[in-house]
Image: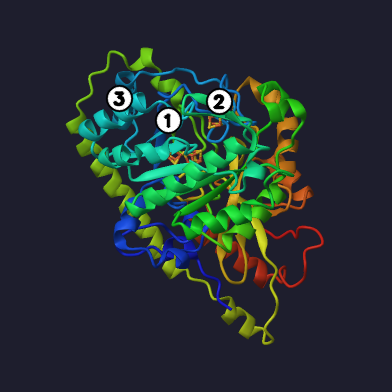
Amino acid sequence: MELKVMTNAAVAPGGGCASSGCGSSGDKLAHLPAAIRAKINNHPCFSEDAHHHYARMHVAVAPACNIQCHYCNRKYDCSNESRPGVVSELLTPDQAVMKVLAVAAAIPQMTVLGIAGPGDPLANPERTLETFRQLSAKAPDIRLCVSTNGLALPDLVEELCQHNIEHVTITINCVDPDVGARIYPWIFWNNRRVTGRKAAEILIEQQQKGLEMLVARGVLVKVNSVLIPGVNDEHLKEVSRVVKAKGAFLHNVMPLIAEPEHGTFYGLMGQRGPTTDELSTLQDACAGDMAMMRHCRQCRADAVGMLGEDRGEEFRLEKIADQEIDYAAAMARRAEVHAAIEASRAAQIQGASETFVSIASLTRRRQAPRELRPVLMAVATTGGGVINQHFGHAREFLIYEASATDVRFIGHRKVDLYCSGDDTCGDAETALSKTIRTLEGCEVVLCSRIGYEPWGRLESAGITPNGEHAMEPIETAVAEVYREMEQAGLLEHAAEAPHRMSA
Ligand code: CLF
Ligand code: SF4
């Protein structure tokens, strides 16, 4: 058996989504033409590896929606793309363009501009298309991306293509109107409100038609689905199968967010969201059918920055209103930064190849081949694909599964900030306890540094802290730790409780 460090090692010479990219193995992407690889290489949502290196931003130019989802209250962000929270600023297209240029100049890693709400972008076609029209002329180095419920999509596919939109996300929660009737109380169609099963039937038909039209024009389509336990959980496998057959590039199954305080139908009626296990089990079940996205952060409709971070406050209109942006100069600087990122990614590929780990040789040394159990490891990182974050500063941990055959990105888990280094530290005890609970099932935490107290608490909980691999590429380090565990004889039996090892 060979343990493959897959993520970077599987990138084609011309660039492209890495192995665990898009939540799938690199082998599943190897068949992609170079042109598609080039499209996803620096798109943080369409490529899992890219999300370590590149940022996205959203501009909230689309207030209205043409349907009602039971998980949405538009006083809050669109729940199918966003965490609940009021959009801070609704922008006009001109304001949106000004903001995008300011962000692009300040955050050169920002490669993608998405319009994702707070309503449905294609229910606001003038505002959405005007924003795209201006940006495709003024900032040709920014990829344009849109997310929609799909109802108006077939009528707008041509125009989207004219504005150089290469990536579209359609939220498809069902392909069966009976399931749909439990998710969508109404749609607005041909100037009237349609309810019940008929509404779901029309919506599904438009979504499928829009998907087919986009695929026929070479646009990369990602399908988002909200996992609603007891409503569409089992059904999403069928959704995955159908959209794959029609040419969708990627499927992103996201957990329902439903809290009473959001004022949504589901929130008020007590509909629960899925557990972490339910989500990953379903993602695994769908993965048999198509590439899955597992790194979605359910961004706000006005999010700015790397996935998982939000720098929107830095770019509020009043803060950027007086800025004069020389975009030609910014574009040159951006190109330099992108080249440096690609050089760093290439170096990581090289490093991963050189540290390719052979479990087979280890097992041979011990003679009889053995079954090795998989291990979950949590990683603290601020990006760049390396382990570079202090344990106490992590707001989320990336979760990887190492096994005898590969290293696989599983998803992320959010935590309360354990240490902010200021007077909030009085709550550290509680926050640390919550963090440890959040990391349940993980046996190792990889971080750049960790304090004495959390180290002890983690060890007591059966989770081994490890700061030995600071600044190393994540997958390489995970593989190395797994190899160390194997050598220490920790992997031969099913884990009754997480094993400890020296770090
Ligand atoms: Fe935005 Fe969506 Fe484009 Fe990405 S987000 S419009 S495809 S640029 Fe990405 Fe955010 Fe998940 Fe969306 S992490 S919510 S999938
Ligand atoms: Fe809300 Fe988005 Fe559904 Fe419209 S499509 S109701 S904005 S979640």
**Mark 3 surroundings within 10 Å by alpha-carbon count, few (fewer than 14), some (14 through 19), many (20 or more):** many
Tell me the tag on residue 193.
Answer: 2
User: Element at badge 3?
Assistant: helix
Relative image position of residue 168 (x, y in whole percent):
41, 43
Q: Nearer the viewer, mark 1 or mark 2?
A: 2
Tell whether 393 sits left or right of 315.
right
Task: Return the disc, 3 or 2, that comes first in the chain's sequence.
Answer: 3
Q: Which residue is drawn at 39% across and 46% down?
A: 43
**Mark 2 surroundings within 10 Å by alpha-carbon count, few (fewer than 14), some (14 through 19), many (20 or more):** few
Tell whether 71 sits left or right of 7.
right
Tell me the tag on residue 97.
Answer: 3
Relative image position of residue 267 (x, y in whole percent):
71, 28
Tell me the tag on residue 121.
Answer: 1
Q: Which of 375 and 154 is in front in this view?
A: 154
Determine whether 218 is above or below 110 in the image: below
Quadrant for the C terminus, please: bottom right
Q: From this viewpoint, is residue 499 visible?
A: yes
Determine whether 289 is above or below 233 in the image: below
Q: Nearer the viewer, residue 362 or 345?
A: 345
Q: What residue type is labelled 1?
A: Pro
Image quadrant where residue 456 sits: top right
Tell whether 467 sits left or right of 271.
left
Determine whether 19 is above or below 391 in the image: below
Q: Label 1 vs label 2: CA separation? A: 19 Å
